Amino acid sequence: MSATVTAPRGPASGPTVGRTPVQNVTFWRALHSEWIKLWTLRSTWWTLGPTVAVMVGFAFAMALVAQFLGDQMAEAGPEVEAAGAGGIIPGPLVVAFGFETAALVVAVLGSMIITGEYSTGMIRSTFAAVPDRLTAFFAKATVLAGVTAVLTAVSLAIAWAVTYPILDANNSTVDFSDGTQVRQLGGVVLYVVLVALFSLGIGALLRHTAGAIFTVVALFFVVPTIFTGAAAFASDIDWVVWVTKLLPSVAGAQITPTAGAVPDALDPWVGISVLAGYTVLVLAGAATRLKLQDA
Amino acid sequence: MIEARGLTKKYGAKTAVDGVTFTVQPGQVTGFLGPNGAGKSTTMRMIVGLDRPTAGTVTVNGKPYAAHRRPLAEVGALLDAKAVHTGRTARNHLLAMAATHGIPTKRVDEVIDLTGLQPVASKRVGGFSLGMGQRLGIAAALLGDPRTLILDEPVNGLDPEGVLWVRNIARFLASEGRTVFLSSHLMSEVALTADHVLVIGKGRILADAPVSEILDGAERKLVRVRSPQATELAELLKGQNAQVDDIEPGLLEVRGSNAAAVGELAASSKIVLHELTPVASTLEEAYMSLTADSVEYQSEDIAAHAGTRSDLEGSKA
């Protein structure tokens, strides 16, 4: 017994050191640290709040549009109304209408979660505490993905509840027995999570907040606008069509309720795999830079 | 214990740290002294694995920093008071750091008390004074109760009370048997705090010795003599191989001799002395003489560059 008490504490404890319980660094502890870091910054609330607001607000506005169109059709006569039964705007599209705008806000969060550490110097504290940089980076990615997934799902649920009375009156609520509709709503969650992770990767590659946000906005919102416009007019030019349908946002959106906005679009699961592929590439590039370069 | 072997860091063509080898021993405060840009911070960043050495190795308590499973219990580092997210409160920053090692909240509050951060603990770091930032950095370094402390310019921006506090805590931690490695560009600070000193200039270790030895070794053996017969005395001294400088009429500075010898020589030649003062060197002078070469070298470089540039401009015109 006394031997246990007086035994040296091993090489890890110095002369008078060891009064503070200190555990090994693990992925879970790194995750816990990243969780604390996420919720202790105001910028998190500034980005997550608007994400919910955009998702719910857009859905509600779209439900009102559906209501208006429904009223117009009712006035036009019972035959037209019968033809349009089930609603002109499908339920999932109404509920998820704000997701691309929400993805933009989430992209800002995804970039800033890492560029904010570079601009303030925090990254040096992060890597001093967790010297295995990939553990630190993937802990960050996991927290971001988890929070984004839950947030998007909750936003969709609120949007569904808020729009339900209007959609129900127009006979166009989400049909949960329809596999396609369920997949489209699940796809929205997947899409937003991938945009967040893609942005994190760009942030880690560029280490600069404005540069990262500009890059992601250009890739996901500006370039697609130009190309989808071009593709609509030049559907006979092969490369324009190909580039358009392989753009990260266009490919990724095929799994969501906004599918089919471009000619000859990819299959939903192929499309989201293309976006996932880009995300993996960017994250791999970021991981390589983290590992090889000075912090 | 910190052991560096041939540690080198190059940034492109510029060599920041040039093959340094040294050992920092536990149980004492080791000062890391050098002018700004000498390579102190780069060396310290390499010790904790933030910068990758171009060549050479450095270990802490026998292993590279990143190989430790509980790095914060091995090394606490204040590398840069600004290594904190400005949008987070001091306490939340410490809680996030503590979480990586499962360090309890109790310890976070302990280091807050220890560093006098209580009044600002729940304020965001963005509004901190330099001194408060330093205290937070030291609090973070102490979180894991580490065996080795690395403090890069810890007294920077601190008020006199803070400077005294850092000095005392460094000495206290060393007295507990820990390794304390503290950098400064202020020799006076190192003289007051450190037992041992590493002097670095232009990326090279210029001296690695106890503070007292540095003071003795580089001492200017100088005696100041004032006499109405200074010219006569100067001749006699030169005859005995002493080096004599005429500072002003009637005032000499004598090297390569000592006060006793000068006094006896004067007495035997019946020369009147008005002043006979041995001048002890300070650590500051010792440091200046040690780093003089590296500084000189630097100005030559600048001169060479300036020459090249004007040549280029000349050829353009």
Image (tube, coloured by chain):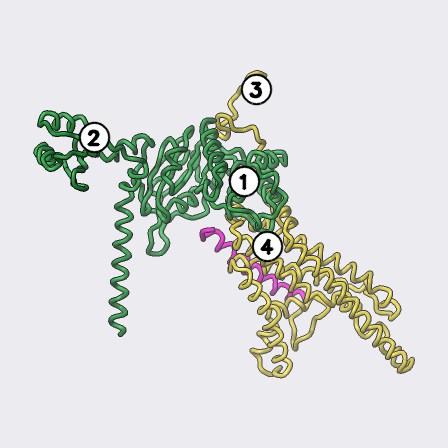
Neighbours of disc 1 within 10 Å: few (<14), some (14-19), many (20+): many
Query: Cβ–Cβ below 8 Å for labels 4 and 1?
Result: no
| Residue type pointed to by label 3 | Val
- From which residue to which does the magenta span run? A268-295
Decide whether the magenta segment is chiefly helix, strand or loop: helix
Q: Which residue is mark 3?
A: A5
Residue drawn at 35 percent across, 56 percent down: B12
Q: Nearer the viewer, mark 1 or mark 2?
A: 2
Q: Nearer the viewer, mark 4 or mark 3?
A: 4
Left-right relation of B70 to B258: right
Left-right relation of B268 to A243: left
Kindly identify which numbered label has been placed on residue A113.
Answer: 4
The answer to which of A115 and B68 lies nearer the viewer is A115
Left-right relation of A255 to B73: right
- For mark 3, give the secondary structure: helix
Q: Colour of chain A?
A: yellow
Q: Is residue B207 above or below residue B312?
A: above
Rendering quarter of residue A72:
bottom right
Left-right relation of A64 to B11: right
Considering only order in the chain, which callout, 3 or 4, is on the residue closer to the N terminus? 3
Task: Measure the alpha-carbon separation of dots 4 and 3.
Answer: 45 Å
Confirm whether residue A37 shows in the render.
Answer: yes
| Residue type pointed to by label 4 | Ile
Q: Which residue is mark 2?
A: B276
Residue B317 lies, in percent from the top left, at: 26, 74
Q: Which residue is mark 1?
A: B140
